[in-house]
Image (cartoon, grey):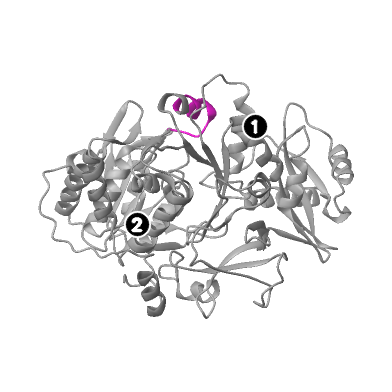
């Protein structure tokens, strides 16, 4: 096990192997086997370019040889910051075959995050595009290289300038003597925390491939499936739920979209016969508003997944009528646990829950502030452990003592309840809960009600500090064609039977929400916005 990582206790590791969860397969072996079975079948489509399974396998071998010549070896960390391009796959599988560890950065990360990743992971290489979405990543690389002595190579897809050109590293494959074990760390992902810099999440070949296998089965992905990747593919959700890697595991085809907008995605759905795609709630709302104004043939779509944050029931009800396909809710985390609604679940479960754990070996506890189990149906803090949930963050001993219980349960930070049939309902994040004079308000509940208003496109509830109550609530609302008044919205919520203390104390109208790198609403930024606005008024007085 890589230094700085926490292993599964032996009794659990033995159980997961005995029960067939961990089958001893590595990512390098997975691709090799798929290339033998599927050969010339198309694995990835990007624009007019198609790559077969055999070509992907060969490209990974050639690039691994080039990486070896640069001196990249087993256990070396390599920061990978590539957009949705075919080379992302070749880079990852080449590193997997060497036993080197990709550290998955997102295209939206900038110097603060990149310098931290390079320093904290002691990265030996950094792989980037030359430019993407109008941004020159070589400038980022210059800063990172000047600050990190371990960073020996910057590898560029495109015009390399003073760095190494990725295209020059595809050389004749050499015999790779590296022994990679399935229990080895395969890569480091980023935690999705909304405060501070991301923790690094170590995932093994064993645990991650198990999650791919189960995801593909539950989502009914097979060799005839066509997965459209519109979200940044380095993120856990589009990477593995079942995502691009789950689709390749099943022998299907991945179609890469340069961006998530309906103008980019809808033509690809029609052209490529896309059967499944994954969205986050703000993007799902955007697609819902756009679909009636477009004339693209979207009839190939069988499943639209929505995850990454809670999807309101009001919006969830609109998906199947609008697109004529199944909605699948996904609730998971890069640290492990993934919950799905099943494709054959009744509509009310699909609309009103965020699914149930995908593995029979997932252990779930819902507890109060004192770690005591709450009664069925009550809201509490979600704890979990299992065959694909990590036992600790990378090089984070002090944080791990807080993030994990003594018996190894991961504290997810999510507030949930569980139905009698074992489905999870996300009520919010513990830090997303508003305590208004002792009355607890789950932001998502109020947002769900606001989204039922015809004039509301999207809504987000955050807390405001208050000297008297401790916290009051503020609703940020994106209107549709015309903005209702704050008074109208409050009356609407009252008429829906919402408790008075849950009706927002303040309503702010906004054109768009600030976003996290994945495209989720950044409530941290919204809280700062209202704090700054209130403070400026106090200063003016």
From this view, report whether residue 297 is shown above or below residue 46: above
Q: Label 1: how many residues lie within 10 Å, few (<14), some (14-19) or many (20+)?
A: few
Residue in the foreground of this view, choosing between 305 and 73: 305
Label 2's element? helix
At horizontal 17% and vertical 45% (from top left) the residue drawn is 62
Secondary structure of the residue carrying tag 1 is helix
Q: Quadrant of residue 5?
A: bottom left
In the rendered image of this protein, does residue 369 appear above or below residue 96? below
Which residue is tagged 2? 147
Q: Residue at x 17, y 42 (%)?
A: 170
Q: Position of residue 365 (x, y in %)?
A: 60, 70
Q: CA distance from mark 1 to mark 2?
A: 53 Å
Q: Any magenta on residue 3?
A: no
Instruction: Indicate the position of residue 73 as horizontal and vertical percent values.
Output: 20, 60
The image quadrant where one finds the N terminus is bottom left
Residue at image point 51% right, 61% down:
337
What residue sits right under mark 1 in the picture? Answer: 321
Residue 439 or residue 538, whichever sits in front: 439
Span colored in magenta: 258-268
- Could you tell me residue 454's position as x and y percent? 77, 32
């Amino acid at each position: 096990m890589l230094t700085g990582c926490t292993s599964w206790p032996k009794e659990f590791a033995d159980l997961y192997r005995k029960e067939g969860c961990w089958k001893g397969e590595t990512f390098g072996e997975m691709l090799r086997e798929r290339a033998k079975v599927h050969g010339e079948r198309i694995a990835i489509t990007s624009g007019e370019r198609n790559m077969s399974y055999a070509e992907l396998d060969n490209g990974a071998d050639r690039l691994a040889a080039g990486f070896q010549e640069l001196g990249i070896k087993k256990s070396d960390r390599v920061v990978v910051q590539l957009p949705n391009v075919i080379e992302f796959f070749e880079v990852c599988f080449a590193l997997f075959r060497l036993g080197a560890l990709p550290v998955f950065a997102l295209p939206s990360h900038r110097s603060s995050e990149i310098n931290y990743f390079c320093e904290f992971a002691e990265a030996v290489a950094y792989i980037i595009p030359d430019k993407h979405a109008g941004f020159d990543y070589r400038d980022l690389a210059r800063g990172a290289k000047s600050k990190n002595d371990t960073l020996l190579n910057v590898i560029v897809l495109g015009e390399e300038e003073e760095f190494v050109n990725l295209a020059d590293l595809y050389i004749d494959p050499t015999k790779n003597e590296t022994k990679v074990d399935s229990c080895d760390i395969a890569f480091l992902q980023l935690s999705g925390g909304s405060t501070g810099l991301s923790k690094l999440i170590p995932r093994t070949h064993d645990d991650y491939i198990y999650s791919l296998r189960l995801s593909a089965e539950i989502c009914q992905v097979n060799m005839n499936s066509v997965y459209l990747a519109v979200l940044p593919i380095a993120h856990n959700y589009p990477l593995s739920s079942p995502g691009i890697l789950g689709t390749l595991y099943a022998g299907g085809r991945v179609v890469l979209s340069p961006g998530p907008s309906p103008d980019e995605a809808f033509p690809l759905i029609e052209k490529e016969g896309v059967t499944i795609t994954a969205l986050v709630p703000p993007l799902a709302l955007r697609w819902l508003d756009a679909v009636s104004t477009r004339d693209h043939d979207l009839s190939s779509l069988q499943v639209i997944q929505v995850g990454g944050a809670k999807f309101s029931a009001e919006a969830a009800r609109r998906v199947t009528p609008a697109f004529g396909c199944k909605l699948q809710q996904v609730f998971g985390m890069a640290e492990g646990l993934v919950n799905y609604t099943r494709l054959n679940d009744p509509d009310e479960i699909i609309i009103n829950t965020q699914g149930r754990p995908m593995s029979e070996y997932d252990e779930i506890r819902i507890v109060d502030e004192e770690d005591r189990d709450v009664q069925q149906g009550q809201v509490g803090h979600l704890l979990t452990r299992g065959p694909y949930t990590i036992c600790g963050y990378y090089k984070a001993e002090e944080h791990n003592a807080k993030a994990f219980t003594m018996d190894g349960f991961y504290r997810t930070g999510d507030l949930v309840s569980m139905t009698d049939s074992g489905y999870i309902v996300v009520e919010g994040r513990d830090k997303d809960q508003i305590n208004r004079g002792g009355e607890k308000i789950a932001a998502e509940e109020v947002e769900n009600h606001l989204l039922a208003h015809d004039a509301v496109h999207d809504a987000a509830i955050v807390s405001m500090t208050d000297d008297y109550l401790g916290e009051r609530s503020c609703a940020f609302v994106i209107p549709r064609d015309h903005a209702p008044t704050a008074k109208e919205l409050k009356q609407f919520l009252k008429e829906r039977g919402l408790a008075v203390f849950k009706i927002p104390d303040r309503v702010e109208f906004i054109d768009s929400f600030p976003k996290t790198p994945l495209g989720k609403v950044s409530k941290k930024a919204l809280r700062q916005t209202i704090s700054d606005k209130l403070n400026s008024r106090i200063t003016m007085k």
